Image (cartoon, grey):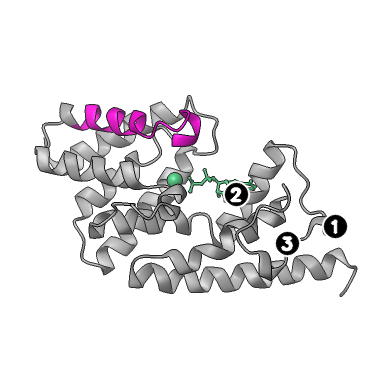
């Protein structure tokens, strides 16, 4: 099987698999992460085949939905790749990337995401939580959970970055989105993240101004 066919078959497999998912990791998140990972991968001169497969398979089974068992997704990914007759080395590489990708991964000092391809997919995944798309995802998530957009009496201030002070969508910017720019691995992603961060800061600035009836 050539690489193009393998990618096509993997796309079909992931789309079908995620149709049964309602966890916020819909197919279009995967689609965007694949595109971004390829854009970064080209600039960073990575193995684009590994980048694309890992990006496609990175959210098959989120650890949050499996009582902390991150290996469910890895196993599903490995099983499908084995059917395509890909070299074992490539399968192992992709599996290692999937296993180590997650926001939890960065908090874990033992994170073993060492390959360039792994760093790229992680960057692309994190970039999808930033900028215009990231903002959209936060409010979609909050709406789905029945949370308030914002509650001024629980406002997280800059000194408390990273802390979960309230369950509002706006608080999620402080506990996650605004931290992401400093967590990028590659030079290319750092540049994109800087731009998206600035946009989110501008967005928050406008949000708070509008909240107070300012022009
Ligand atoms: P990832 O895809 O990186 O694993 P998550 O599963 O944590 O991210 O979240 C999926 C999306 O939902 C992200 O865009 C994230 O910013 C958003 N999200 C996660 N938790 C919250 C929350 N408590 N409030 C608002 N948005 C959230
Ligand atoms: Ni993801």
Is ligand 1 within 8 Å of the beta carbon of the residue shown at mark 1?
no
> Predominant secondary structure in magenta?
helix
The disc at residue 133 is none
Helix, strand or loop at label 1? It is helix
Q: Is residue 75 magenta?
A: yes
The residue stretch that appears in magenta: 63-81
- Which labelled disc corresponds to residue 137? 2
In terms of depth relative to the viewer, which is nearer, 25 or 150?
Answer: 150
Which residue corresponds to mark 3? 156
Q: Which mark is residue 153?
A: 1
**Mark found first going from the N terminus, 2 or 3:** 2
Quadrant of the snapshot with the C terminus? bottom right
Left or right, 94 with reference to 69: left
Which residue is located at x 24 percent, y 28 percent? 80
Residue 120, how many percent across, how many down? Answer: 32, 58
Where residue 168 appears, as percent x and y from the top left, is: 73, 50
Foreground of the two, 165 or 79: 165
Where disc 3 sits, the SS reads loop
């Amino acid at each position: 099987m050539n690489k193009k066919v393998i990618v096509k078959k993997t796309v079909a497999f992931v789309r079908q698999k995620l149709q049964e998912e309602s966890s916020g990791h819909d197919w279009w998140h995967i689609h965007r992460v694949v595109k971004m990972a390829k854009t970064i991968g080209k600039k960073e001169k990575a193995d684009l085949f590994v980048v694309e497969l890992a990006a496609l398979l990175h959210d098959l089974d989120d650890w949050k939905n499996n009582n902390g068992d991150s290996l469910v997704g890895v196993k599903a990914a490995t099983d499908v790749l084995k059917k395509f007759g890909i070299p074992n080395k490539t399968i192992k590489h992709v599996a290692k990337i999937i296993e180590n990708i997650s926001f939890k991964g960065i908090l874990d000092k033992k994170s073993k995401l060492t390959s360039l391809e792994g760093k790229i997919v992680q960057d692309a995944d994190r970039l999808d939580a930033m900028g215009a798309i990231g903002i959209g995802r936060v409010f979609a998530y909050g709406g789905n959970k029945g949370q308030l957009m914002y509650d001024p009496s629980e406002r997280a201030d800059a000194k408390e970055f990273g802390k979960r002070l309230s369950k509002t969508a706006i608080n999620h910017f402080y506990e996650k989105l605004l931290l992401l720019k400093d967590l990028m691995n590659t030079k290319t992603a750092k540049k994109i993240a800087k731009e998206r961060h600035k946009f989110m800061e501008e967005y928050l600035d406008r949000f708070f101004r509008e909240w107070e009836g300012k022009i």
